[in-house]
Amino acid sequence: MSAQGLTSEAQLRYLLQWFGEFSELQREDFLPVLAASRCDKPEQLAATMANMTCQDKPVSLFQCRIKLFNEWFPTWSREEQDRFVTKISEIDSEFGEKLHEIITDGPKVNGTDEPWINEQNVEAEREDQVPENIPVEIVAAS
């Protein structure tokens, strides 16, 4: 049992149910959160969460669910995390494809079609040539 009194299995069921209730916009907001958690990129997750804060507004149910996701997901075994990603992909195959794309290629930066440069892409680029323009994501936290 976790500190909240829920097993990881119960946490997983809650998150799957909530994902099923998310609107299309909420799923778009959840995508980079899940991708950052899945790739173990805390700096990317922090930047994503900074963009989700709403000053002078009550916290939404969606934000509470994302907060619980961020508390629960890292405590699960790799098998449980894999099962969560598989189930979400079964619920929304387009979301699953986008998630796989982000995990594989990195997120798109600043609305461009160019993927975020990850270590594999950088290594491949070095072998061919050094790129002139590397997309950079700048996120301001408030």
Image (cartoon, grey):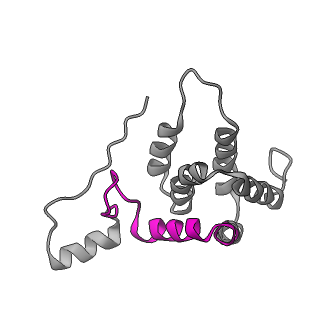
Query: Is residue 92 inside the magenta stretch?
Result: yes
Q: What stretch is highlighted in magenta?
A: 87-116
- Residue 36 image position (x, y, % from top left): 51, 56
Q: In which quarter of the image is the C terminus?
A: top left
Q: Nearer the viewer, residue 95 or 119?
A: 95
Q: Residue at x 68, y 72 (%)?
A: 90
Q: In this view, does 34 lie above or below 68?
A: below
Q: In this view, does 72 lie above or below 141?
A: below
Left or right of 104? Residue 109 is: left
Q: Which of 26 and 70 is in front in this view?
A: 26
Query: Is residue 96 inside the magenta stretch?
Result: yes
Left or right of 85? Residue 38 is: left
Left or right of 121? Residue 22 is: right
Q: Main secondary structure of the magenta part?
A: helix
Q: Which residue is drawn at 26% across and 56% down?
A: 135
- Residue 2 image position (x, y, % from top left): 80, 50
Q: Which residue is drawn at 64% across and 45% down?
A: 66
Q: Which of 94 and 47 is in front in this view?
A: 94
- Residue 136 image position (x, y, % from top left): 27, 51
- Residue 37 image position (x, y, % from top left): 56, 57
Q: Which residue is drawn at 53% across and 33% down?
A: 53
